[in-house]
Every structure is written in C-alpha cells, then in structure tokens.
Image: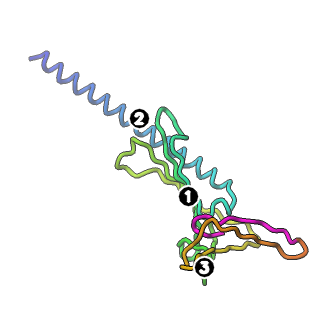
C-alpha cells in the first residue's frame, strides 16, 4: 500500500514537472515571436513609402530559433487620418500615414492568437503625388508602369510599377 502511494506521488510530481517545462517552452517561443515582430517593424520603418505601399509578404522557415520555425507576415497600407480606413486618394481622403503590421506565427501556437505588432509611418514632409491605377472595371491594377516628371527646370523623372493595390 505504501509503495502504491509513493508511486502515485512520484507520477504526480513528474507530471507537474512536465507541464511546467512545456509551459516554459511555450512562453519562450511567444517571447521570441514578440522580438521577431519588433525586429520586423524596425525593418519596415527603414523601407521607402513606395516599398510599403501595398506590401504583403510572408517569410517562412527563414527565421528559426531554438528549433522552432517562425512565419512572419509583413503588410503596409495607406491610412487616412480622418477615418483610419485604407485609402489611395479619392474625394475628401488623404494618405496621411502608412500603417505597418507584422504578424508572427509558429507551429506550437495552436488556437492561441498570433503575435501582432503594428506601427504608423508618416511620409516625409514635402510634395508628393499619389496615383491610383484602375482598369476599365474600376478595379485597382498592379504591374502598371507610371512615370512622374518633376517641374521645370529640373525635369527629373521617376518610374514606378504599381503594386497589387494599384496605389503609387
């Protein structure tokens, strides 16, 4: 009887250790995901307005820490200051900021929410041109080349290819 009692106590103790180790590992993975999201937001802050316009990229298996592969999805979109809605021109709207979103997932996440970090980037003060390219059905069009030429006397020009959302 006493050996049975010792066996039950030992089993309960080892189960407690196992649960504790698993929770510590999950917390470590989540903390690493927070750091990865922060690093991705810092990377996005270094991109140009053109690179951020319509950004939607996913990196998988490039980031591996302690044997865990993390998936990072980075997004950027124009946001109007007055409505917090995505914008690319139009009457009464302005592209005041670019909102960035970095979402990090990993296999052990299961049903819990992913780690998400967001930021707002204000375009540089000065002149800017915002062009929305649309097809004959009024849908945003990507892959179109737009050439912008500066005022005289400089006449400098820049070529841009519209991203999927057609916003240059």
Residue 33 screen position, x and y as percent = 49, 44
Q: Which residues are magenta?
A: 155-168
Q: Earlier in the sequence, mark 2 or mark 3?
A: 2
Residue 123 screen position, x and y as percent = 69, 66
For image coordinates 46% across by 36% down, the residue present is 68
Q: Which residue is mark 2?
A: 25
For image coordinates 61% across by 64% down, the residue present is 163
For image coordinates 68% across by 73% down, the residue present is 130
Distance of mark 2 from mark 3, alpha carbons?
A: 47 Å
Residue 158 screen position, x and y as percent = 78, 66
Q: Earlier in the sequence, mark 2 or mark 1?
A: 2
Q: Which residue is mark 3?
A: 93
From the viewer's perspective, is 125 left or right of 142? right
Residue 116 screen position, x and y as percent = 49, 54
Q: Is residue 157 magenta?
A: yes
Q: Which residue is mark 1?
A: 56
């Amino acid at each position: 009887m006493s050996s049975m009692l010792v066996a039950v106590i030992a089993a309960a103790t080892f189960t407690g250790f196992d649960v504790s180790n698993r929770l510590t590992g999950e917390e470590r993975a989540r903390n690493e995901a927070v750091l990865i999201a922060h690093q991705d937001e810092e990377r996005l802050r270094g991109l140009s307005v053109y690179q951020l316009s319509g950004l939607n990229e996913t990196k998988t298996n490039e980031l591996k820490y302690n044997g865990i592969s993390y998936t990072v999805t980075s997004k950027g979109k124009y946001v109007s200051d007055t409505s917090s809605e995505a914008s690319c021109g139009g009457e009464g709207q302005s592209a005041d900021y670019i909102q960035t979103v970095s979402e990090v997932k990993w296999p052990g996440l299961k049903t819990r929410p992913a780690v998400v970090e967001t930021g707002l980037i204000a375009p540089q003060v000065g002149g800017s041109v915002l062009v929305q390219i649309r097809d004959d059905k009024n849908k945003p069009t990507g892959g179109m080349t737009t050439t912008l030429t500066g005022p005289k006397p400089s006449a400098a020009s820049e070529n841009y290819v519209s991203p999927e959302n057609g916003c240059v």
